[in-house]
Structures are given as structure tokens and as C-alpha cells.
Amino acid sequence: MVYTMRDVAQRAGVSPTTVSRVLNNTHYIAEETKTRVLEVVQELNYFKNVHARRLATGKSDLFGLVISDIANPFFPEVIRGFQTAAWDRGFDTLLLNTEYSDERTISIVRKLVESDVRGVAIMTSSIDHTSTHELTSAGIGVVFSNQCSAEKLVSNIGVDYSGGISEAIEHVVQLGHRRTAVIAGPERNRTAAAITRGLTAGLSRRGMKPLIVVNSNYRVDAGASAVKEILRAPKTPTVIFCGSDLIAMGAMSSLEEAGVKIPEDISIVGIDNISFATLARPPLTTINVPREEIGKTAFHALERMSQLKRHQGAEYTLKTELVVRKSTASAPLS
């Protein structure tokens, strides 16, 4: 027999509204009442009918989360933060992956509109905010990361890389480094471009203009080919700043193959502080980006927009900081 929410309410001696609030964790309910409802739910083996709820309320239980590459270790903590925040509020997450494909992005936007999601967090700068007009036109709120200014149905989470970059530059200055290079992220990636500008400007102000700036991708093999170009340059840097930890670890592997010792010959600094950074050999000095907090903030930004009468978006800023490990050391004497 298939039981309804009304059956659960009747058996537990509460209203259907109370059952809904217990199952969706959207309001405070006395522990005794919550326990009684959950016992009946288990006894009747009751499952929420999300389609019936959508028909009744005109809204789904879904929030969309769009990333670029599920294989990139930058994203798991973003996903965890977003899903945890959504789950705590009784909502589910529709996770979609662009694979850096424009064609796939178009299909994803269409899928999100068709799924009638309550809001969408686009946590990849590989999607331009102008390509998501279909979402806001459908009344769906969108939150971006480092992309645009807030407006109706649009919020933005800005990651302030400047603090972490300043700390990283000061760190290598104190270690006596003067010859620097930068392995940047993809040229067309807005976040990567902003990080590169911050690094080159900060280094130049300290009289350490990079000897060479090379672009790389965010794949597993990132940084390897860039290192070969750096080592062919007339002067060899004593420290390399990398646009991500993946790039940094790819660079470290390539340097090791070339017989370059880290950090004795060349120091390496990454960005992101992914979990693998501590497993690198040597462990990677990197700029910490609070990725789980990005995910949580993205969900709360979407929920807040949906609750406001005018659905006005807002700006959010998260800070970065340097984490010093063993991939940086005093500059070699030569």
C-alpha cells in the first residue's frame, strides 16, 4: 500500500503541515513531535512525492549547481558545502558539469530551466553570465563566482585573492628570492586572468617582475609543458608562482624529471589549497581558497534571493590566506 502525507499525519496525531516541516527541516519542531513523526514515516515506509509537491506548491525541491570539471579537485569541497547547506534546509542538488564545452553549457541551461530549479549556483568562470539569460528570464535566481555585479536575480561571490597573493609575495621576499616566473591558468578564464594580473602587479611592485609568464590549463597534466618553456629561458627563476595547485603539482613533477630539486633549486607556490597539496612531495606552499565556504555561501545567496520580494541579488566577499609548507625555502646563492 502507498501511504500519503495525510496518512502519516493522522497516524502521528499531527497536521500534514507539521509532517512536511519535519521532512523538509524548514521550521523548528519540538523533538518529541519530530521523533513521533519520523517513527511513523519509518513504520509506513513513507516517501515524499516530489511531483505532487511541485504541483501543490508550484516549486521544486531542487537547486542547481554547475561546475566545469568533476575531475578537478578544486570542486569537491565546493559541492560538499553547497549540498550540505541545501540538505540542512530540506532541498536537493542537481549537479551538472560543463567539461568546458559551450555546446554542453547551452544544454545545461536548458536542462535547469526545464527542471524548474529554485536557483542555480554557477561556480565556474568558464560560463559567461550573459549566457544564462534564459535562467533569469524564467525567474530563476543565479549566483556566480568572480563574474559580475549584483542585480535582480543575480548575486556574486567575490574571492579576494589579493590578501593571499600579498602574503605569498612577502613570504618569498623574506626568503631572498628575486627571480620569479608565473605559470598562469587559461587565458580566457576570467578568474585565472585576475589572479595573473594580481601576481604580476604585486611582484613588479617589489621589483621582481616575472622573467616569464606562461599559460596552462587546469587538467591533471597542467604545468608540465609550461615548465619546459621556463627552463629554456635565458635566466632561470628561483621561485615559480602557479595559478592553481594542479598546475603547481604538474610543474613539480616536470621539474623533478628535469633534475631540478624543490625547494633547493626552485621554490613553488600554488593557489587553492586542495587536499592533495599536503600529499605533494614536498608538501605544497599555497594560497588557501575557502572552497567549502564558497559552496555554503552560494546556497544561502540563492535562498535569500528567492525569499526577497524583489529578488534582489547581493555581493559576497571571501578572503584568502597563505599556507606555508615545504615547497618554498631560501633562494639559492647562485
Image (tube, grey):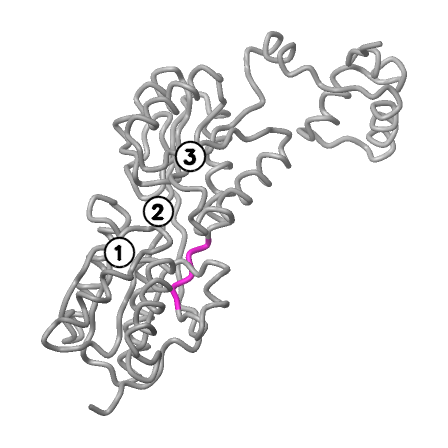
Q: Which mark is residue 195?
A: 1
- 274 vs 307: above or below: below
Residue ID at (44%, 61%)? 273
Distance from Cα at disc 3 to Cα at disc 1: 23 Å
Q: Is residue 42 left or right of residue 170?
A: right
Picture quadrant of residue 105: top left
Q: Nearer the viewer, residue 37 or 328?
A: 328
Q: Earlier in the sequence, mark 2 or mark 1?
A: 2
- The picture places residue 114, in percent across and down from the top left corner, at 45, 14
User: Tag 2: Cα neighbours inside 10 Å, few (<14), some, or many (≥20)?
Assistant: some
- Give amino acid for label 3: Asn
Q: Which mark is residue 158?
A: 2
User: Tag 3: Cα neighbours inside 10 Å, few (<14), some, or many (≥20)?
Assistant: some
Q: Earlier in the sequence, mark 3 or mark 1?
A: 3
Q: Which mark is residue 47?
A: none
- Residues marked 2 and 1 touching at CB (< 8 Å): no
- 91 vs 69: above or below: above
> Is-magenta flag for residue 151?
no
Q: Which mark is residue 97?
A: 3
For this orientation, the residue located farthest to the bottom is 333
Picture quadrant of residue 232: bottom left
Q: Nearer the viewer, residue 5 or 217?
A: 217
Q: Which residues are magenta?
A: 286-290
